[in-house]
Image (cartoon, grey):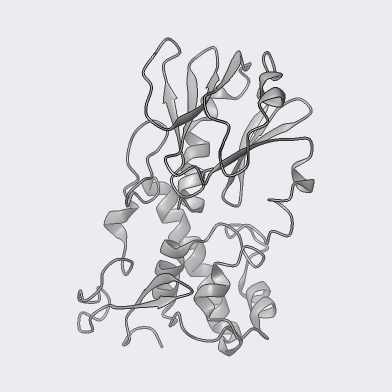
Amino acid sequence: MPELPEVETSVQAIQEFVNQNIESIKIYNPNLRWKVNSSAFNALSGIKVKEISRRAKYILIYLDRSQILIHLGMTGTLRIAKKNSNFYKKHDHVEFIFQSGKLIFNDPRRFGSMHFIKKSNEHFLLDNLGPEPLSKEFNGEYLFQKIKKSSSPIKTTLMNQAHVVGIGNIYANEILFEAKIRPTRKSKTITKKEASKISLSTKKILKRAIKAGGTTLQDFYQPDGNKGYFKIDLAVYGRTNKTCLSCKKEMIKRIVQSQRATYFCRKCQA
């Protein structure tokens, strides 16, 4: 599933459509995770895009008095194409046509979604979200206070969008390896100092991933068609039984937590 760096990369890549009018929207298949409101989208012809931004793992396209909310789901991607291109890929579901080109939403598994909304802060997908991990609000003190009574494993806590947004399985593994914290630790055992290390590692890992264009494992590609190359920098995720890059001695261990693969070094991560 695309996580914060992949979504941020997508947002940065489609900034060319800001200040352009939507000429038309073609909906080939409205049956995504939630059915696309075709009549509302068809009424957006001629409306100018004022801003494109990200909140958590969601893309927000701001119009005059409304927004379009896009969730990429498990396998969703955005693709930029030439305006006069008739090339159609299997699983292309929605196509935005602008003066300079097309923005196409493709999603093989259709777990993604697209919504027409009046106020983003009132939409059910955006309710009760925690702070952005790259914001000043997300720091060691905030994290410590949030988790000090929780018995959940710290990795599960990091992936809880009510605590902090945008962190999925890949980056939770990488963050905790960087912070030298074992993913199975109960959150309430994390000290203030360790909470600070986790918050700093979060910012460091996510910034590196955004700079590298995200992580391509199976499905994620940037809208311009390029792969995300943070995969080459993954220190622990997917490295089962390979030598730890930090201690050079222990083999990376893989376990399953909450039906997700967890990777860690038993020597480096206390």
141 up-or-down from 65: above or below:
below
Q: Residue furthest top?
A: 84
Looking at the rendered structure, the number of numbered marks drawn on it comes to: 0
202 up-or-down from 65: above or below:
below
Task: Name the residue: 79% across, 39% down.
Answer: 119
Q: Would residue 202 be found to the left or right of residue 215 on screen?
A: right
Residue 219 picture location, percent across and down: 36, 45
Residue 195 picture location, percent across and down: 57, 78
Residue 208 picture location, percent across and down: 41, 55
Q: Nearer the viewer, residue 1 or 211?
A: 1
Residue 106 picture location, percent across and down: 45, 34
Q: Nearer the viewer, residue 251 or 211?
A: 251
161 up-or-down from 270: above or below:
above
30 up-or-down from 3: above or below:
above
Task: Name the residue: 20% across, 76% down.
Answer: 243
Q: Would residue 57 be found to the left or right of residue 85 on screen?
A: right
Could you tell me which quadrant the C terminus lies in? bottom left
Task: Name the residue: 34% across, 84% down.
Answer: 268
Residue 182 found in image quarter: bottom left
Task: Name the residue: 25% across, 76% down.
Answer: 244
Residue 64 found in image quarter: top right
Q: Nearer the viewer, residue 123 or 135?
A: 123
